Structures are given as C-alpha cells and as structure tokens.
Image: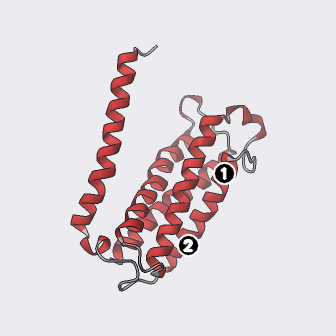
Amino acid sequence: AVPEWETVLMTVGFTGMAVGLAVGLPLYLRERWPGAFLGRVGDGGVAASGKVTAAMVVTAGLAVLWSQWALGGTVGLDPERRGLWDVDGRLLHAGSGMWALLGVWSAWVLTRGRPARVPRWVPMAVLFTASGSLFAWSAWKLPMALLHPGGYVTAEFTLVAVVQHALAVGAGVTFMAGVVRRV
C-alpha cells in the first residue's frame, strides 16, 4: 500500500506539471510562432492540405468510436474482456473523444477561416492541446497493445486497439505539422 502522504505529493506534483504545461506551452508557442496566435481567424486564412483534411476525417472517426464506448457501446470490444471495461475506462474515452472533436473543430476553423471574429489563439491553442492528447495518449498505449507487458490486455480486440492508437498518433502529428507549416 502507498502511504497517504506519498499519494498527496504525487497528486500535487502531477497537478503542478499539468498546470505548468497548460500555461507554459502556449506561451512558448506564441513566442516561437507569433503569427499563429496573433490576429483573428480568417485574416489570411490557409487552405487545408490533403493530409490535414485526412487527419480531420480520421480524428472524427476516432471521436465517434471513443464516444460510443464512453456511452456504453460495444463495437470493437472483445466480449471475453468486457469485464475490463469499467467507469474509469469510459471516462478516459469520453475525454479522448472530447479532445478529438475539439481537434477537428480547431483544424476546421483554422483551415476554413470561419468564424472570422474568433481570435486565432483560441483554436490554435485548442489544436495544439488536442494534437498532443491524440499523440501522447496513444503513443504509450500502442506499445502496450502490441507487446502486452506483464500480461496487460486491452478491452478492445487487439487489432482494434493497435489501429486506433496508430491512427491517433498519426493524426496528432499531422495536425501539429500541417498547421505549423502554414503559419
């Protein structure tokens, strides 16, 4: 058992790191790419590349998959492993689905230039966060699904787990690279 004081310190440490990243990363990005964060959407908007459009479609599909799991759907889940599916898993997939939808919205707004009254930093910051969520979460889940360390198994069929995480990693990288190249 972990002592209570250790749990409190870990929680404070992770919370501090999360707040630091949430505040520091956008500040760094604004300094690094000021054109991406200044002005309003629609001021010299950029057209979406084929890769960014494909990433939006893939991410929308992932959002639907994750949202249906969060709402109790069973498409893609292994019936023999449904006992692994609990409230925590549903909440994690609800969060992933939310960030995927926000990523699609942000990419759409930035590449279509609508609505023009929105400050550019809003969808840009959301897109950076969403792309990081897609990439980071699936980048550690993909090897877990492939290698099964310590007997780890997913509630999804293995092929479904591998494909969804590979697609999410690719979409996260594509969002980041595609938008950064155009600002």
Q: Which of the marked residues, 1 or 2, is nearer the chain's N terminus?
A: 2
Q: Which residue is mark 2?
A: 54
| Picture residue at 35% right of the left edge, 75% below the top | 181
Q: Is residue 150 above or below residue 138?
A: above
- Rounded to the nearest angstrom, the CA distance separating label 1 from label 2 is 19 Å
Q: Horizontally, is 48 left or right of 65 in the view?
A: left
| Picture residue at 65% right of the left edge, 52% below the top | 67
The residue type indicated by label 2 comes to Ala
User: Residue 153 lies in what quarter of the image?
Assistant: top right
Q: Residue furthest front?
A: 117
Q: Horizontally, is 144 left or right of 41 in the view?
A: right
Q: Which mark is residue 26?
A: none
| Picture residue at 47% right of the left edge, 71% below the top | 107
Which structural element holds mark 2? helix
Which structural element holds mark 1? helix
Q: Which residue is mark 1?
A: 160
Viewer-closest of 81 and 35: 35
For the residues bearing labels 1 and 2, Cβ distance under 8 angstroms: no
Q: Is residue 153 above or below residue 172?
A: above
Q: Residue furthest left?
A: 31
User: Residue 13 lies in what quarter of the image?
Assistant: top left
Residue 45, image x, y percentages: 40, 83
